[in-house]
Every structure is written in structure tokens, then in C-alpha cells.
Amino acid sequence: MLQRLMTLIFLLAAGPAAAEAQPCKELPPGPQRFACASARNPGLSAKRDRCKEEGRKLGLTSNIGGKMGPYVQACMQRR
């Protein structure tokens, strides 16, 4: 009986840890995926901000039809 109880406690304790171990790449692109990646790599937000600033210096905008989004994505991948 004690062994079953210990097994149950172990499985319940391991459940949330297994859920948190989900790779960020399995999430769909968007804010949740970026938040997941930022939690694992604290410098990622600063990198994105540098890329946005670089885009602004080039005259890119983030409004509809602007090229800021694709530029920031390319900048994040090349650096």
C-alpha cells in the first residue's frame, strides 16, 4: 500500500515538470512562443529590441503594409 502511495505521489509531482519541458518550437508562432523562448534565453528580448531599433533607423514602420515584422525576424535569425 505504501509503495502505491509513493508511486502516485511521484507521478503527480512529475506531471507539471513534464508539461514545462515542452520545447518552445512546438508552440505556434506568436507571443506565447516568444515568451517561452525568452524565459529560456533572457537576452532574446534585448536582441529583438536592437533589431527593431535598427529597422526604425532604416525607416521601416510596423503599420499595415510596413516591413518591420519581416525585417525583425530576419535580423533575429542572422545575429
Image: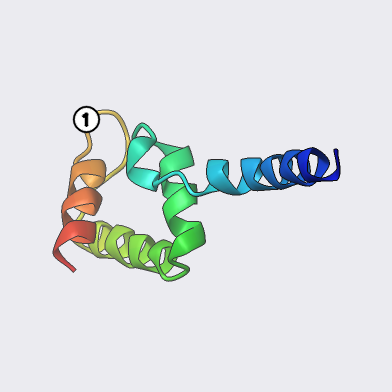
Indicate the colouring scheme. rainbow
Question: Which residue appears farthest toward the front when viewing the image?
Answer: 1
The one nearer the camera, 43 or 13, is: 13
Circle count:
1
Does residue 65 lie above or below 25 as drawn? Answer: above
Q: Secondary structure at mark 1?
A: loop
Residue type at the position of mark 1? Gly
**x%, y% of residue 20?**
55, 47
Residue placed under numbered mark 1 in the picture: 65
Horizontal side of 63 relative to 43 (left or right) equals left
Horizontal side of 75 relative to 33 (left or right) equals left
- Quadrant location of residue 46? bottom left
Quadrant assignment for the N terminus: top right
Horizontal side of 2 relative to 7 (left or right) equals right
Horizontal side of 41 relative to 64 (left or right) equals right
Residue at (21% x, 54% y) in the render: 59
